[in-house]
Amino acid sequence: GKRPMIPRQPMPEQDPRRRRYNFEEVPRGYSEETAMLEAGRCLRCKKAGCVKGCPVNINIPAFVALIAEGHFAEAADKLKEQNALPAVCGRVCPQESQCEAGCILGKKGDPVAIGRLERFAADYARTHGHEPLACAAEPSGKRVAVVGAGPAGITVAGDLARWGHHVVVFEALHLAGGVLMYGIPQFRLPKEIVQYEISNLKKHGVEIRTDMAIGMTQTVDQLLENEFDAVFIGTGAGLPMFLNIPGENAIGVFSANEFLTRINLMKAYDFPRYATAPIRPKRAITVGGGNVAMDSARTALRLGAESLIVYRRGMEEMPARVEEVHHAQEEGVEFHLLTAPKRIVTDGRNRVTGMECLRMELGEPGPRGRRRPVPVEGSEFIIPADTVIVAVGNRPNPLVPRTSSGMEVSSRGTVIANENTMMTSKPGVFAGGDIVSGAATVISAMGQGKQAARAMHKYMTGEEPPCV
Amino acid sequence: GFELLEKRELVPNMHLLRIRAPQIAAHAKPGQFVILMAGETSERTPFTLADWNADQGDITLIIEEVGRSSRELISLPVGARLAHVSGPLGQPFDIQKKGTVVLGGGCYGIGGILPLARALKQAGNRVISVIEASSSYLLFWEEELRAVSDETRIATKDGSRGTRGGVQEVFEQLYRHEGPVDMFIAMGCTFMMRMTTELTRSWKVPTFVALNPIMVDGTGMCGACRVSIHEETKFACIDGPFFDAHGVDWDELDCRRSAYAREEVEALPQAADLNALMFPEAAHQGCGCGR
Ligand SMILES: Cc1cc2nc3c(=O)[nH]c(=O)nc-3n(C[C@H](O)[C@H](O)[C@H](O)COP(=O)(O)OP(=O)(O)OC[C@H]3O[C@@H](n4cnc5c(N)ncnc54)[C@H](O)[C@@H]3O)c2cc1C
Ligand SMILES: Cc1cc2nc3c(=O)[nH]c(=O)nc-3n(C[C@H](O)[C@H](O)[C@H](O)COP(=O)(O)OP(=O)(O)OC[C@H]3O[C@@H](n4cnc5c(N)ncnc54)[C@H](O)[C@@H]3O)c2cc1C
Ligand code: SF4
Ligand code: SF4
Ligand code: FES
Ligand SMILES: [Mg+2]
């Protein structure tokens, strides 16, 4: 049949000139009318390429159709079958390289705005107090420990609680949520949404014990011996990497984790009401080209700084989401590409005054297909700045693997788990998320959590889960 | 909840807090620390475990009142609940039989060395505890330390008791005239730890210090606590707090510890009405001085 050509509906956004001075969310979300219009573009394909692109295989044609018909709460239920945190994924998934990349409409024009619709349905359910139907599972009498309250741990806890198990989540920090709380900034993912999901977990009987670093208090071995039938490890990749260049311990050089934690988790932007000292950059260089770098640079901007990004490769090679790069550019972040840090320049009091850099050229493609940057000899120059934020990646947190007996770890420090069951080399201990895959994405962490939850249910009861 | 069970000002500005924290008491080892938040708007601030009782499920801290966060903590009334106490954190001190071990404590370190002294003595060492203060009236826990040490020495800056000077003067006396000493350990202000390090450097006696850089999470996630040890970057919260004193870059540590000097002043109650923040229901009681 013939359909009228409706263009992809734009997302209303806060004006860049205004938003660069506040921490409010940038995209405002679709209205009901716009959502239905956008959902109406979907062709409801039989062999939907979009579903293949989604790491957790959300039934996209189905939930989009429900939105098109105005059944918003039902659309949210559909999403929840595969994805414990649709309000989060709708906001932070790299859709352009996942679900939307597989959408047939993208072949000729613009793909369906799947992420925006996902966000719309989830926000609708939350703001209308709609709760998905609970699973009528009998209490199993089994107890599960979940270590780490990031997206992986949240997923496992939610599923296993619905299936009748008693779940206790152990979180090292004082608030649950993992990177969603301490890393991703308020203007991209409001913390209220994360805490709403945490409070839902509690409502379903999940016990959350914060301020508990497993390995320092009880070890995983002790959890298994004393109290629990199975353990899930979702401790993430929270160990920041530095550049290993001279001057890196000067005052004014921060890991992106520290910079973002002070501002997001500790709410230093509201200092001195919140007691944690803020960082107050005047001119901030962020080193790196991923989402973490974009978040840091845009946060620096909002703290009143001139904000620059220094990245070794070119725009094409940037691993950050397209939308984030675009937002950063709109807001006025300056990009210095093909530029590599060589040394931090300091004054007599060990405070940062700038960063010496080298220009780079792109050479032959490396083993992973990305062209390797090579330094141009004699091209040193200094970029003045009072703050340098290092956002060049995170490694797995070693605390749990180091303190658990018989847990196999790769040379990269990731925990080795069976790719179907997510069981580690330690019987009864499962793992998923960044601690297994290395720094990856929210949705992949949740996908592994889903897999692990099913396998854990089977491991404890010998049966398939009673519901999805 | 982390109930405040007991609070005493031992000497001016030095407070003992006993807090209910069964999980921490059950797993604590000598040399470890905790991170406290008095309220939900507080900073995360590290304090050394000065004592604990696994049976009773409580921990004891010695808190020096220096700025906003320590003041928030010591302003809590007995019976109140701290928002967060997380721990134990840090690597415990590696307790082994070495022979004669000399422990130096200043400021909060007087309390911090108590569990070390106790454990080292139990491991069969001859333990000499040395404590310092500006003046005799600022000394505390002398009896507690005597009970777990073979010997306890005193130093005061004004000479009002014991040796005139600090921990380093007593260390020198012990090493030169009463040796041999097999290990020195120092905990307290950076200045004292640095002086003892310079002193023992030429003696070639293993010396350990409990470093106190600024921390945020205490789990290895932020890197705020990085210190240079033998020119290698370490995270004091997960690799420390104890390090080979002779490898420490003290200038760097001094600098990094003062990174927020401005904000620390701004954070004080004259800038924010602390009582109103912490006890909204009692905002109009008391003089508002923050204590
Ligand atoms: C700044 C930033 C921006 C990002 N942006 C995006 C984005 O836009 N889109 C996207 O898809 N992904 C993004 N990511 C990546 C994504 O956030 C992670 O891949 C995801 O959070 C991993 O989830 P996880 O559950 O494995 O671990 P985490 O979210 O890291 O959570 C692990 C939790 O375990 C806790 N923990 C650690 N050790 C212990 C212990 N011993 N005991 C108890 N608890 C412990 C930690 O405190 C933490 O709360 C971003 C990451 C960062 C840092
Ligand atoms: C491992 C460790 C163990 C410690 N043990 C004790 C103890 O047992 N008793 C005790 O009184 N103090 C201890 N300290 C020091 C204590 O953490 C600081 O005195 C306290 O954080 C000061 O906070 P404030 O807001 O009251 O003071 P502020 O006015 O904010 O700061 C005063 C000074 O304290 C230091 N400081 C500030 N914030 C931090 C922070 N987040 N982490 C570390 N240092 C900071 C800085 O050098 C600063 O100049 C310890 C520190 C570390 C790292
Ligand atoms: S979870 Fe992510 S990848 Fe999957 S449909 Fe939603 S936005 Fe797309
Ligand atoms: S591929 Fe595109 S058009 Fe087809 S079902 Fe998926 S979203 Fe709809
Ligand atoms: S305090 Fe954050 S890594 Fe040590
Ligand atoms: Mg402070």
Image (spheres, rainbow, N blue to C red):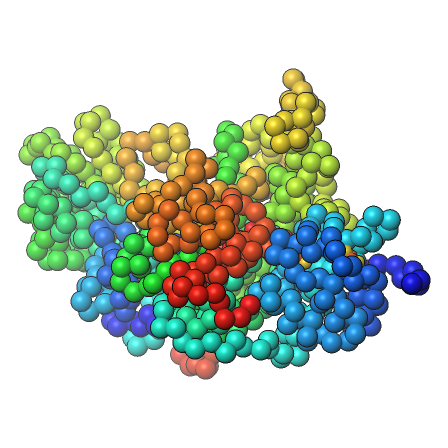
In the image shown, does A441 or B280 lie closer to the viewer? A441
| Residue A119 % position (x, y) | 69, 65
Question: Could you say which quadrant of the image residue A187 lies in?
Answer: bottom right
Pinpoint residue A57: horizontal percent, then vertical percent. Answer: 64, 57
Instruction: Give x and y (percent) for residue B199.
Output: 23, 32
Assign the C terminus of chain A to one quadrant of the image. Answer: bottom right
Q: Residue A365 at what x, y percent from top left?
A: 67, 26
Q: Quadrant of residue B234?
A: top left
Q: Does residue B4 appear to the left or right of B41 in the view shown?
A: left
Q: As rendered, which of B79 and A347 lies closer to the eye?
A: B79
Quadrant position of residue B173:
top left
Q: Is residue B47 above or below residue B79?
A: above
Tell me if I can see residue A50 in this picture.
yes
User: Which residue is rendered at x = 63% and y = 26% of the image?
Assistant: A366
Q: Residue at x 46, y 52 (%)?
A: A422
Q: Viewed as shown, does residue A66 lie left or right of A80?
A: right
Q: Horizontal placement of B278 versus A316: left or right?
A: left
The quarter of the picture where the N terminus of chain A appears is bottom right
Q: Determine the residue positioned at 74% across, 71% down.
A: A66
